[in-house]
Image: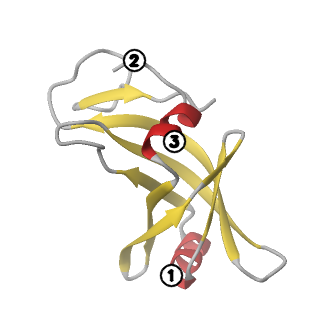
Amino acid sequence: MTETTLKNALKDYGLEAYLITVGDDGPHTSNVTVELKGSILNCSLGRSGQKNIGGQPNVSLLWPPLQSGGYGIILNGRAEVAEDARGTANASIALTKSVFHRPGAKQKAGVEACQSDCVALKRT
């Protein structure tokens, strides 16, 4: 796997992702459509996601592997909630860590905390 940018990865993996938030009652996963604007990801939110981000702004986005044994994408970030002109809640997510990930032995140096097969994903 060669290093790539988030913009290029989204061309391959698509704009549909799983957003994982955490609230008082535990984790919540929702399917979202993301939009990349510079190094910020934006998506619409449901009530649970909006409530959870209000209390705990750290979130993760997940794209499953495209094929068995392939890399998935895991993006971690800090979200802020705002409403658009129609009253729809949206999250703006500033990324803190972005990796291609799959189980297995670490392939190369570069992603310090990952003990699996991780490849850093450039944000721009």
Say which label, 3 or 2, has the lower sequence index: 2
Badge 1, how many Cα within 10 Å: few under 14, some, many 20+?
Answer: some
Residue at 54% across, 32% down: 8
The image shows residue 85 at horizontal and vertical percentages of 84, 77
Callout 2 amino acid: Thr
- Please give the residue where the numbered disc 2 appears in the rendered image: 2
- Please give the residue where the numbered disc 1 appears in the rendered image: 48
The answer to whether residue 12 is above or below residue 16 is: above
Say which label, 3 or 1, has the lower sequence index: 3
Say which label, 2 or 1, has the lower sequence index: 2
Q: How is the image coloured?
A: secondary structure
Distance from Cα at disc 2 to Cα at disc 1: 37 Å
The image shows residue 60 at horizontal and vertical percentages of 45, 55
Callout 1 amino acid: Ser
Of badges 3 and 1, the one in the foreground is 3
The image shows residue 26 at horizontal and vertical percentages of 35, 76
Element marked by disc 3? helix
Callout 3 amino acid: Leu
Residue at 52% across, 53% down: 15
Distance from Cα at disc 3 to Cα at disc 2: 15 Å
Badge 2, how many Cα within 10 Å: few under 14, some, many 20+?
Answer: few
- Of 42 and 50, nearer the camera is 42
Element marked by disc 1? helix
The answer to whether residue 70 is above or below residue 64 is: above
Quadrant into which the N terminus falls? top left
Distance from Cα at disc 3 to Cα at disc 1: 25 Å
- Of 56 and 27, nearer the camera is 27
Confirm or deny contact between disc 3 and disc 2 (CB under 8 A). Answer: no
- Please give the residue where the numbered disc 3 appears in the rendered image: 10
| Image quarter of residue 28 | bottom left
